[in-house]
């Protein structure tokens, strides 16, 4: 037997008899890392805390995991030396560990506006640990207002406007029926607000809640705001563009957010609502610059025409419902009679 083959066999035998390295347990880790004063300096001179509060870790969703499941490079004591240029480098390095278990959610982030910013070198763009935390990871949206607080760490101005809105105030009060940031923007595949497909599906987005009878009945709101929007000239044009995927360039047909606002939505009866009668002309002039004082009266809002509300429109609509079938039916009957006469005269 040649020496190389013998050496190979001995190595394989050794590999089979050597027990696998066991992970160090959490108590061993916390023996040092529970020290509140434990820090390390990054290369830029910033002091980074390495302290972990045992009670915080015990309440996280990862409480049953071993520290070394995430800190895979630290599975031996003393730890191998690792140096980071800055605190941000540490966060970016740890973000990669999340992919080991949460690959599906990570894949979604690849299409997000956040990950696109990371890809182009924006080191301030959020990664997993910025939103979810590290040792204090909780269940998503627990509590519910934690979502907007998390987003506010980057989007301070938007968060302030949302907090003053009818949605934001309700979320703060613990109402689970109203949308938090991630209900509209999604969590991992966050779309940029300037994307044309985002603007095209705005009515669908709002309609997902406002056409829900079970939810709207709780607050005495009509579920027909979505259907009435789709039946008027704004909605029909928006629906057509959405089906065609028409790019949003220049002035576009009014969608929900154009009239009601985006993050600062108020009750339609509130004094600062853009759709209250006193403010409606100003809202219309965003698209119709030459609109006169009587211009808003041409729009039915989200009302359906009836004998008591817009009776003339209701009468015309009813007339069309009768006349059009009568005309088409009469035309069809005329053609059939003409064909019958032709056959009878042969």
Image: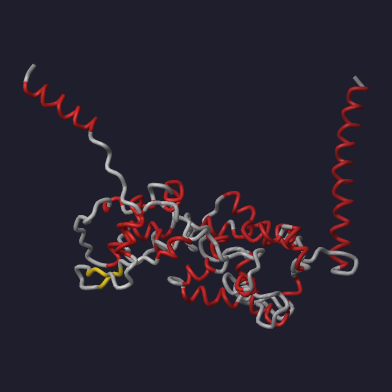
Most foreground residue, 127 or 24: 24
Most foreground residue, 143 or 216: 143
Q: Position of residue 290 (x, y in %)?
A: 63, 77
Quadrant where the N terminus lies?
top left
Q: Position of residue 40 (x, y in %)?
A: 24, 68
Question: Image check: 25 left or right of 335?
Answer: left
Q: Position of residue 222 (x, y in %)?
A: 77, 64
Quadrant where the C terminus lies?
top right
Instruction: Say which quarter of the image contains residue 219.
Output: bottom right
Most foreground residue, 204 or 127: 127
Residue plotted at (72% across, 58% down): 211
Q: Position of residue 59 (x, y in %)?
A: 48, 61
Residue plotted at (58% across, 70% down): 262
Residue plotted at (48% across, 56% down): 61
Question: Image check: 246 left or right of 82?
Answer: right
The residue lying furthest to the left in this view is: 3
Instruction: Say which quarter of the image contains residue 251.
Output: bottom right
Residue plotted at (57% across, 71% down): 263
Please, is residue 264 above or below residue 29 in the view? below
């Amino acid at each position: 037997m040649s020496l190389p083959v013998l050496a190979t066999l001995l190595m394989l035998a050794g590999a089979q008899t050597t027990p696998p390295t066991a992970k160090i347990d959490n108590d061993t880790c916390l023996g040092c890392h529970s020290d509140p004063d434990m820090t390390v300096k990054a290369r830029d001179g910033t002091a980074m805390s390495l302290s972990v509060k045992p009670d915080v870790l015990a309440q996280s969703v990862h409480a049953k995991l071993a520290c070394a499941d995430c800190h895979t490079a630290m599975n031996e004591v003393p730890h191998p030396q690792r140096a980071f240029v800055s605190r941000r480098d540490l966060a970016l390095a740890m973000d990669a560990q999340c992919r080991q278990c949460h690959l599906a959610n990570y894949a979604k982030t690849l299409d997000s506006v956040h990950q696109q910013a990371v890809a182009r070198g924006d080191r301030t763009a959020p990664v997993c640990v910025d939103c979810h935390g590290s040792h204090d990871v909780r269940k998503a949206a627990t509590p519910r207002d934690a979502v907007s607080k998390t987003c506010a760490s980057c989007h301070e101005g938007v968060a302030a406007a949302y907090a003053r809105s009818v949605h934001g105030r309700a979320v703060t009060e613990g109402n689970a029926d109203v949308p938090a940031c991630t209900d509209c923007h999604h969590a991992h595949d966050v779309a940029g607000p300037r994307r044309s497909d985002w603007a095209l599906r705005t009515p669908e987005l709002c309609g997902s809640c406002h056409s829900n009878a079970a939810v709207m009945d709780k607050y005495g709101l009509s579920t027909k705001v979505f259907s009435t929007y789709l039946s008027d000239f704004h909605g029909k044009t928006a629906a057509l563009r959405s089906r065609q995927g028409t790019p949003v360039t220049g002035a576009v047909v009014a969608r929900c957010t154009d009239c009601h606002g985006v993050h600062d939505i108020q009750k339609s009866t509130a004094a600062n609502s853009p759709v209250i009668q006193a403010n409606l002309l100003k809202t219309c002039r965003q698209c119709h610059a030459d609109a006169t004082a009587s211009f808003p009266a041409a729009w039915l809002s989200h009302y359906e025409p009836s004998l008591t509300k817009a009776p003339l429109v209701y009468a015309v609509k009813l007339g069309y419902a009768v006349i059009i079938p009568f005309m088409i039916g009469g035309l069809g009957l005329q053609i059939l009679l003409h064909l019958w006469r032709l056959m009878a005269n042969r």
